[in-house]
Image (tube, helix red, strand yellow):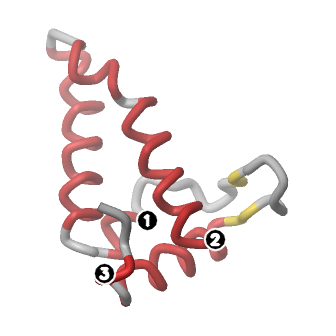
């Protein structure tokens, strides 16, 4: 369940930042850079880099599940990164 939450978060971030790929001009570069760094951090199972985009007071909401705070999210990523063989492909 926690791994699925982390994957859902990743997908949500990808969808949220999808506009960054279509964005042009200097004003979009910081957004594109932040997203590319997050994708690289996630792909390399870099917990610090993956967590760097989340505010300390982040509150993740998933239908049918309790709200998750930053510590919950970090635990979910830590567990997922510790067991890459169980990650969905």
In the image, 88 versus 31, the foreground residue is 88
Mark 3 and 2 residues: CB-CB less than 8 Å, in contact?
A: no
Quadrant location of the C terminus?
Answer: bottom left
Residue carrying label 1: 51
Quadrant in the picture for residue 33:
top left
Cα distance, mark 3 to mark 2?
15 Å
At 58% from the left and 61% from the top, the residue drawn is 5
Quadrant location of the N terminus?
Answer: bottom right
Lower sequence index among marks 1 and 3: 1
User: Where residue 43 sits in the image (x, y, percent)?
Assistant: 22, 64
User: Which label is found at residue 84?
Assistant: 3
Q: Image check: 26 left or right of 2?
A: left
Q: Image check: 22 left or right of 5?
A: left
Residue carrying label 2: 1
Q: Note whether 67 is above or below 73 in the view shown.
A: above
Q: Note whether 62 is above or below 72 in the view shown.
A: above
Cα distance, mark 2 to mark 1?
19 Å
At 55% from the left and 75% from the top, the residue drawn is 76
Cα distance, mark 1 to mark 3?
17 Å
């Amino acid at each position: 369940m926690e791994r699925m939450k982390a994957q859902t978060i990743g997908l949500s971030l990808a969808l949220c930042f999808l506009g960054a790929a279509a964005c042009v001009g200097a004003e979009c570069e910081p957004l594109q850079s932040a997203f590319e760094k997050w994708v690289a951090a996630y792909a390399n199972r870099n917990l610090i880099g993956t967590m760097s985009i989340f505010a300390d007071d982040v509150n993740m909401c998933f239908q049918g599940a309790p709200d998750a705070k930053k510590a919950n999210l970090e635990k979910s990523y830590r567990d997922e990164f510790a067991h890459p063989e169980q990650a969905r492909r």
